[in-house]
Image: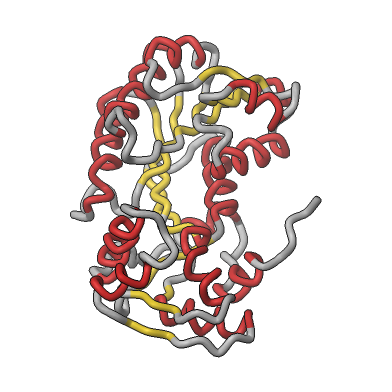
Amino acid sequence: MKYAVTGSTGHFGKYAISYLQKLIQPQDSIVALARNVEKAKKTFGENVEARPGTYEDPDQLTESLKGVDRLLFISSLPGAVMPRIDQHNNVVQAAKAAGVKFIAYTSFPHADTTEAPLAADHKATETLLKKSGIAHAFLRNNWYLENEMNFVEEANNGEPFVYSAGDGKVGWAPEELYAQAAVTVLTTDQPKEVYEFAGPMHSYDDLAKVLQRVTGKDFEIASVSDDEFMANLRKYVPDKVDAAMTMIQKLIRNHDLEEETTDLADVLRKPVPSLEKQVRGLFKEPAK
């Protein structure tokens, strides 16, 4: 059995390959697909096979996926020159041409029913996978705690914690746990078709109060309008990023990420850490 991971040198991909290395022997049955093959070789060592995996090149993808049985397909980032859905179509069609037997795809919460704009490409990709005839699992990841590092860093500096998501709740969990769950599904003989992966639901007010306890800083917590949120963001994020982050706040305010699910804990076979434990993990020194 040969396993492959797309986007292997990104954060999620690195976590996934690392966990695969712990589960799969021999390690030469693991393929790291990457835009930069040399970077992948340096990152994962000679035991993992690095192959080119640019989403924009369907012929290259087809060649690189030959011999692969099970593929972890990590969704690309929006905003590239080639539309994300076209990139995703290239991956699906290449996998089909190469004879890949199973694909686990990182998707969006309730991608088939939500009206959230961020979900559109994921919904279309799920449809592509269904039409491809390839066995698949949709890994509908809720939200990575690491997405909130701007808030964490500002709070740690004693700056006001400013948000516009109202009382909307999010299922935060560390990206590493989502990646571990993805690999567990990838290596499971009979996975479900849909996994709604999320940690316990919390609001930004919850997150701010946890940050106060963890940092010991008594910073201001301010629930504001989108315009006020964006104006505050402009102090420390690049142009265009402020609009994207404000759109996400609106999405959360509309309760698009709220859900009741135990899929993440069930697949990991352990409880998802509390929000406070997750936040404390952000302040630990990385292992050398």
Q: Indicate the position of residue 77 as horizontal and vertical percent values.
A: 39, 40
Can you tell which quarter of the image residue 271 is in? Answer: bottom right
**Number of dots carrying numbers:** 0
Left or right: residue 201 versus residue 122 is right
Can you tell which quarter of the image residue 139 is in? Answer: top left
Q: Residue at x 30, y 78 (%)?
A: 166
User: In front: 20, or 210?
Assistant: 210
Left or right: residue 127 versus residue 190 is left
Q: Indicate the position of residue 225 as horizontal and vertical percent values.
A: 24, 77
User: In front: 136, or 40?
Assistant: 40
Does residue 126 appear anywhere in the picture? yes
Quadrant showing the N terminus: top right
Q: Residue at x 45, y 87 (%)?
A: 220
In the rendered view, how is the structure colored? secondary structure
Residue 157, compared with residue 5, is above or below; it is below
Q: Indicate the position of residue 38 as horizontal and vertical percent values.
A: 64, 21
Work out which residue is located at the far left of the displayed protein and give it. 115
Q: Residue at x 63, y 36 (%)?
A: 17
Residue 96, compared with residue 14, is above or below; it is above
Left or right: residue 227 versus residue 191 is left
User: In front: 159, or 80?
Assistant: 159
Does residue 26 appear anywhere in the picture? no
Left or right: residue 196 versus residue 19 is left
User: In front: 258, or 12?
Assistant: 12
Q: Residue at x 55, y 90 (%)?
A: 218
Work out which residue is located at the far front of the displayed protein and give it. 235
Can you tell which quarter of the image residue 268 is in? Answer: bottom right
Q: Indicate the position of residue 224 as horizontal and vertical percent values.
A: 29, 80
